[in-house]
Image: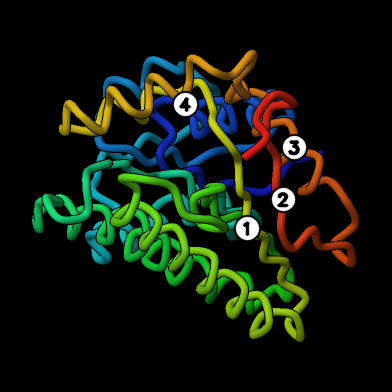
Amino acid sequence: MSRPLVVVSGAGSGIGAAVARQFSAAGHPLLLIGRRKAALEALDLPQSICAALDVGDAQAVQEAVRQAEQRHGTVDCLVNSAGIMRLAAAAGQDAAEFAEMLNTNVVGSVNLVQSVLSGMLRQRRGTVFNVSSIAGRQAFPMHAGYCASKFAVHGYTAALGLDMAEHNIRVSTVSPGVVDTPLLRSTTSASARAMFEEWLGTLDSLLAPEDVAGIIAFAYQLPQSVCMREIFVTSTSQGS
């Protein structure tokens, strides 16, 4: 039996790459979206289309989804995992970095949702996972800009879920704690990196990307009538 199309953003590394491998192993054709085509192609997954683009570019996102749907049919699942983290002291946060976080983490998520919703509405089914963060639920030092973007993802996803419920479309916020991914590398502030790395040293364990991917896959395979509206997961050792 053929499986429906799954779209994964941020698929070049971390949670996105783990999600792509998980859904590929289950037999789904994939549209993999990321900034670096080489990283997407390195996954070497069957039935996958690799689209190197900026998720903040709505036209590019829409065109990539259109081409994938022409080949594999309507998107049944979107995993919005693209994101960047530019930690910095609030008073010294670079305005361009703040804007970049909002454009990728918030606008990029909305662009992808908008690109798949028409098909989901036509077929009266579909699932959207917006990957947020524990930093979308509570504040942390030197996280003002990042928290702003992830709190926005939380609010958007919750409201979207209310709008889509009557159309049999599931919408979930995925809120991981610290995951062992390259995300911290996007922080340019040396003091913020040092603060975060010192805090990481107090944890006995971190989530692996595969942990989060497995939870997303579990939530997806539940009956369409069952929606895990928020998935909040941390390593056992992460108390806050």
Reading the image, the residue beneath label 1 is: 173
Residue 180 horizontal/vertical position (percent): 50, 21
- Name which residue type carries label 3: Ile
Relative to 110, is 97 above or below? above
Work out whether mark 2 precedes mark 1 in sequence or the reverse, and give the earlier one. Answer: 1
Q: Nearer the viewer, residue 234 or 90?
A: 90
Which quadrant of the figure has residue 95? bottom left
Reading the image, the residue beneath label 3 is: 215
Quadrant showing the N terminus: top right
Quadrant showing the C terminus: top right
Work out whether mark 1 precedes mark 4 in sequence or the reverse, and give the earlier one. Answer: 4
Work out whether mark 2 precedes mark 3 in sequence or the reverse, and give the earlier one. Answer: 3
Crowd tier of the residue under label 4, counting other residues whose Cα lies within 10 Å: few below 14, some 14–19, many 20 or above = many
Separation of disc 2 and disc 1 at Cα?
6 Å
Q: Secondary structure at mark 2?
A: strand
Separation of disc 2 and disc 3 at Cα?
8 Å
Q: Is residue 37 left or right of residue 9?
A: left
Q: Nearer the viewer, mark 2 or mark 3?
A: 2
Residue 85 horizontal/vertical position (percent): 32, 41
Residue drawn where x is 54% and y is 28% of the image: 179
- Name which residue type carries label 1: Thr
Residue drawn where x is 28% and y is 22% of the image: 194
Residue drawn where x is 72% and y is 66% of the image: 170
Q: Nearer the viewer, residue 27 or 165?
A: 165
Q: Secondary structure at mark 4?
A: helix
Reading the image, the residue beneath label 4 is: 14
Separation of disc 1 and disc 4 at Cα?
17 Å
Reading the image, the residue beneath label 2 is: 231
Relative to 196, is 109 above or below? below
Cβ atoms at labels 2 and 1 below 8 Å apart: yes
